[in-house]
Image: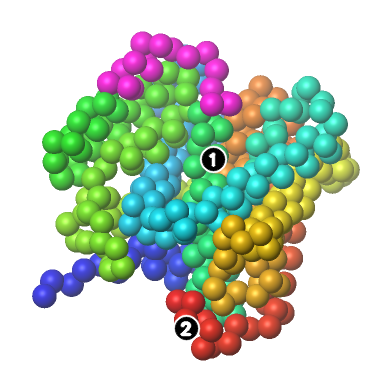
Amino acid sequence: MQNRPASILREFLAGEAGGAILLMAAAALAMLLANLPGEAGHIYHDMIHAELGPTLSSKLGAMTVHLWINDGLMAIFFLVVGLEIKREFLDGGLSTWDRRRLPILAAVAGMAAPAIVYLVVTGGDPALIRGWAIPAATDIAFAIGVLALLGDRAPASLKLFLTAVAIVDDMGAVAIIALVYTQGLDLPALGAAALVLAAMYGMNRAGVKALSPYLIGFALLWYFTLLSGVHATVAGVLAAITVPIRCTPGAPDAVDSPLHKLEHRVHPWTAYLIVPLFGFVNAGLTINGATLGALLAPLPLGVALGLFLGKQIGVFGVIWGAARLGIAERPAGASWVQLYGTAMLCGIGFTMSLFIGGLAFPADPLLVEEAKGGILMGSILSALAGFAVLRWAAPTPRRVAAVAE
């Protein structure tokens, strides 16, 4: 019998700590280089803003290293996000409404509460309102990576729940990027993107299983989306929706499923190269006396409190309320203390928050830097507090953990 590949979800849950550690190392290196004394400190910024290639869009100008990573490589990251979303809804942990109910409610509340906290802290300042979505996103790789460091102290049900919440959260983040941070649409380019997407959907309906036509379509869709004014990374999720899948409920991924094959091939590149590169070019916050003093300014404080307080209030509040009202059952084998620690980990917004922060204030580098400070502060607090709560929580009895799995 032909060996089938292990489930990408099982691989993800088992080995994501390595990707998270690499992301943290890349971010730390960026901050180190950005804070080198004298002229050496400018090398980092000159490197990431160096022009590399032609002008693809007059709105964006010449393509720089920063743009190629944020608008190009991150589209591949969002392709993987889209593949994970489709797989989970058709063939995984979100394939039934009973399984979807709690993660969807927790993700929605976990996006709304941080936005409300942010708006309250910033006092409705018109110059800062566009940043409301910065603390609304959860970094799935980072959060699962921290959870993976706990090993057997975190039951499998917690990992599955956190993954499901983060996936729904990603859907919300993509919708926000497409609807809120899109300006000045180029209708002919948008029409061309729609035609490419329709052709890719037609290939799916016609039974085309080869991956190469979909990858060519993805490249064309990315280009026309870039020209249209919609953020180019949205093309990744739209392309993923058209990739065919062969469902194998309760079994490892099918070797003849195009979606599973593509996800297996691309996921390691995103986890171990693209996301760390993104962290490297976006986390280079220059730290000095003025920067440290500015951390208590409304923007960074709103982002930090949104991530640290808003996320745990929204996510844990929904879990508690849903269980008490009988709307949904809490994850099997997980204590309330463990669920609270997991809700704290949802406040790690690193990758997605940095991404949205750059979109929220494209014309004001100072506000982007302030947002970075708040993101780092809120994400680090959430990671450390969540890890501590889960580390010192009473371990799940092995018999209960086995039933949960």
Q: Is residue 110 magenta?
A: no
Q: Please state the horizontal and vertical placement of residue 47, each as a whole percent of the image.
A: 55, 37
Q: Please state the horizontal and vertical placement of residue 25, each as a whole percent of the image.
A: 58, 59
Q: Nearer the viewer, residue 171 or 363?
A: 171
Say which quadrant the C terminus sits in: bottom left
- Residue type at mark 2: give it: Ala
The color scheme shown is rainbow
Report the Cα–Cα distance between label 2 and label 1: 32 Å
Q: Residues within 10 Å of mark 1 (few under 14, many from 20)?
A: some
- Relative to 160, is 400 above or below? below
Q: Which residue is rendered at x = 22% and y = 27% of the image?
A: 199
Query: Which of the two discs, 2 and 1, labels the residue nearer the N terminus?
Result: 1
Residue tagged 2: 402
Q: Nearer the viewer, residue 301 or 327?
A: 327
* Image side of residue 61 versus residue 86, left or right: right
**Residue 355 showing in the rendered view:** yes
Q: Nearer the viewer, residue 287 or 351?
A: 351
**Residue 378 showing in the rendered view:** no
- Residue type at mark 1: give it: Gly
- Residue 172's label in the rendered image is 1
The kind of secondary structure element at disc 1 is: helix
Say which quadrant the N terminus sits in: bottom left
The stretch of residues the image draws in magenta is: 179-195
